[in-house]
């Protein structure tokens, strides 16, 4: 346990999983959320429900979040923004409104959240005072980016030795949808966002130390669809029949990792939920035969550390924080 586990990390690039699940109810996995720590700078990519709870369990202080980046606007990726903004706002040392960097559409999400939480923000300022809950820094601010004409990628941040590149992915009809690549101190990691197999991602992820990729098992999802049909749950069966076309399978994620020449692969956005360890083999299918590097099914609390000197360590952040 440490007062600030982030400060204890070695210099380098670190990725912590604050939500490895999907919109489907999953007692083991929160909705999608990834924290990236570059040196002492903390970014959060997507903030689904339970994001702030899981970040706190990992000892990552919401007050230290420099910006949130959104890959797209499905509910499971934005549903935790409200509570995260509140926690960051009242945390000691937080500065300014919470920056939300995303493709076009991010302005609507932020405007809606600010309106939905306006009354609550006012109550908290009235209750705790301007010093703890300053009205001028309540809520979020949108920072949209777009791709130059004909381009599939664009740099959204480049300072202090850190470069963040956004690239298009294919999650149609959810449009726009992007992934992000972080480069810092010679280390690199890539977050796919939600996507089917994407040649743009393969190019953007070239040579990265770590790829964190969306994964849905078509075989297990079909079993869930069949069970829903047999139970007469036609709406649920239709949803399970629809979703495999806009998420990559574990095998496709492994193919993307191999083709991109990345060092290691972590699968996230796990669909369907895997309540038993024995389901992990069927979930992966032939993925391990398609990618020879380290391959993990991500879990909430995971920490992947790419220290500036080299190497890749996997551990858990759970139990490191002052509240644990
Ligand atoms: Zn999703
Ligand atoms: Zn999605």
Image (cartoon, rainbow, N blue to C red):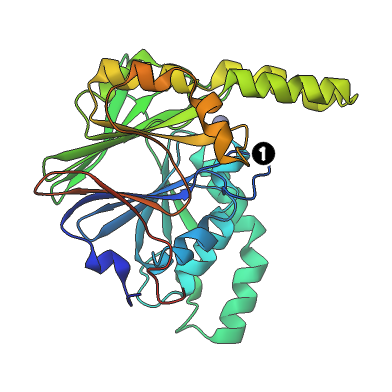
Q: Is residue 315 left or right of residue 311?
A: right
Query: Does residue 257 lie above or below 141 as drawn?
Result: above
In the displayed structure, would residue 263 be above or below residue 199?
Answer: below
Which class describes the residues within 10 Å of circle 1: few (<14), some (14-19), or many (20+)? some
Quarter of the picture containing the N terminus is bottom left
Horizontal side, residue 94 vs residue 206: left or right: right
Residue at (35, 16) in percent of width and height: 290
Q: Quadrant of residue 92?
A: bottom left
Work out whether residue 298 or residue 281 is closer to the camera in this orientation and state it.
Answer: 281
Q: Give the percent coordinates (x, y) of residue 127.
A: 61, 85
Which residue is pictured at 72% across the width and 26% down the height?
224
Q: Residue at x 54, y 54 (%)?
A: 81
Q: Quadrant of residue 279?
A: top right
User: What is the number of callouts on the image?
Assistant: 1
The answer to whether any part of residue 274 appears in the image is yes
Quarter residue 256 falls in: top left
Q: Is residue 60 left or right of residue 79?
A: left
Relative to residue 222, is residue 314 drawn left or right?
Answer: left
* 92 lies above or below 119: below
How far from the left and from the top, in percent, is residue 55?
A: 45, 60
Q: Residue at x 89, y 26 (%)?
A: 231
Q: Kindly state the secondary structure of the residue where label 1 is placed.
A: loop
Residue 109 x %, y %: 56, 44
């Amino acid at each position: 346990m440490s007062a600030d586990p982030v400060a204890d990390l070695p210099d380098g690039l670190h990725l912590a999983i604050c939500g490895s699940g999907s919109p489907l109810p999953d007692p083991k996995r929160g909705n999608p959320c990834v924290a990236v720590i570059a040196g002492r700078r903390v970014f959060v990519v997507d903030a689904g429900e339970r994001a702030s709870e899981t970040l706190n369990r990992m000892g990552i202080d919401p007050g230290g979040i420099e910006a949130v980046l959104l890959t797209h606007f499905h509910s499971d990726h934005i549903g935790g923004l409200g509570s995260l903004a509140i926690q960051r706002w009242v945390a000691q040392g937080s500065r300014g409104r919470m920056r939300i960097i995303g493709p076009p559409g991010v302005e609507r999400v932020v405007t809606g959240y600010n309106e939905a939480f306006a009354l609550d923000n006012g109550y908290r300022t009235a209750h705790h005072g301007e010093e703890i809950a300053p009205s001028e820094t309540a809520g979020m601010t949108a920072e949209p980016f777009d791709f130059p004409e004909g381009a599939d990628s664009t740099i959204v941040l480049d300072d202090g030795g850190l470069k963040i590149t956004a690239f298009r992915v294919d999650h149609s009809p959810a449009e726009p949808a992007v992934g992000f690549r972080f480069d810092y101190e010679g280390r690199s990691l890539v977050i796919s966002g939600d996507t089917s197999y994407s040649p743009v991602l393969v190019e953007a992820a070239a040579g990265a130390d770590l790829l964190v990729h969306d994964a849905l098992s078509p075989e297990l999802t079909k079993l869930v669809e069949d069970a829903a049909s047999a139970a007469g749950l036609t709406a649920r069966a239709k949803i399970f029949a629809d979703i495999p076309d806009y998420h990559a399978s574990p095998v496709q994620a492994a193919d993307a990792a191999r083709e991109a020449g990345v060092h290691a692969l972590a699968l996230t956005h796990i669909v369907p939920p895997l309540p038993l360890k024995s389901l992990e083999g069927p979930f992966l299918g032939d993925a391990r035969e398609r990618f020879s590097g380290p391959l993990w099914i991500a879990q909430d609390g995971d920490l992947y550390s790419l220290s500036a000197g080299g190497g890749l360590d996997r551990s858990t952040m759970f139990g490191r924080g002052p509240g644990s």
